[in-house]
Image (spheres, rainbow, N blue to C red):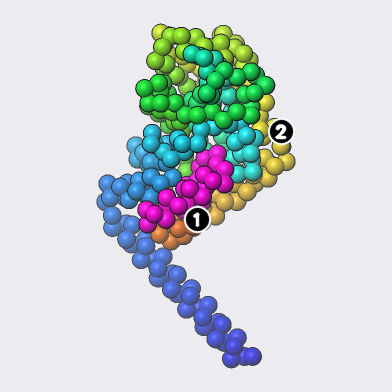
Amino acid sequence: MYVLFSIAIIILLAAALIFRFRRKRIICRILGLSVPEKVYRLNCLLAPFGFEYQISQDIFVTRLDAWQREYGYRSLYDRASPLLGMVFDCEPVYFDYQGKTWLLEFWKGQYGINTGAEIGIYRADTLLSPAQRPYTLFHTVPDEELPVFELELVKGASRRYRLLRRHWWLAGFCMGEFTSPELLSLRLAVTFHSGDMLEAFYQGLLEAGWCTEDICVCGRRISLSFYTPHTPQPRRLFPLLSAFSQCRNRLFLWIYCKVTAPFCFSLDQLLYLAEYLPFAFRHMICIQKKKTGRRRKANDFSRKDR
């Protein structure tokens, strides 16, 4: 019995020494890379998940060719978000244009261990009644019809980032940061390809409960500031689940900070995590409203990339 116990202790000590040596070797390897090399390596790791790293603002943004584009969007994803560790304010705006019902939605809040915001545009195959909208799958929009999105996420009195791109789903995430949704404000603008589409969206905003004083229109560009939602919120429908998700997010963030303590910059932290704990890296990067099929496909892409 004592022999077995001694062997177990020796094995544990040996494993601890191996992990310590491996950890130091990974840290030295990352420190030896130049910044362009780090950015290139990280973006190669992020591409299968539909994201890219923007070093100028130390954030993660969505790619135009992200694989999520194939799957469209439906309100079920918002309602299921607290189950996936995402606690946010969202504002779905429906409007009818050219014989189809469109959805332009924006979000701000906590996505796992990330603080972020999103805006996306989708359309149905036909005109929908208000009763049909929550149960319909909306598809993404072709490139020639994409608007120009502008996002500026503000936390308290501090601007976290600003993005401007022609996109179907523009999102930015600050890795390793915790914020309650009500502490965030989102300044956004959309430039449409036609004045008629802008007018249809404007009417959709009014139907969603927005006041004309809160909306600014200039040509084909419409801008507004998103502080308090005007529509029912998933996190309000399931308050206990949302509170549990936020507690879990805080715990995971604490673990993330402890594990990546040798570094203080997201670029280095994620490269370190990808080598030291690859499964944890994949979990941190899955920042999207996903269903089982989506998650499985992302993992398949990840395996092919390796």
Which one is nearer the viewer's eye here, 254 or 106? 106
Please name the residue shown 33% across and 62% down the image.
28
Q: Position of residue 145 (x, y in %)?
A: 40, 21
Instruction: Count the numbered circles shown.
Output: 2
Name the kind of residue labelled 2 in the image. Answer: Leu
Tell me, yes or no, whether the highlighted magenta stretch contains residue 103: no
Give the answer, above or below, for where 259 lies relative to 163.
Answer: below
Please name the residue shown 51% across and 33% down the image.
72
Tell me, yes or no, whether the highlighted magenta stretch contains residue 281: yes
Name the kind of residue labelled 1 in the image. Answer: Ala
Q: Which residues are magenta?
A: 280-306
Mark drawn on residue 237: 2
* Residue marked by disc 1: 280
Q: CA distance from mark 2 to mark 1?
A: 30 Å
Q: Quadrant of residue 66?
A: top left
Please name the residue shown 44% across and 69% down the image.
20
Dot 1: few (<14), some (14–19), or many (≥20) neighbours within 10 Å? Answer: some
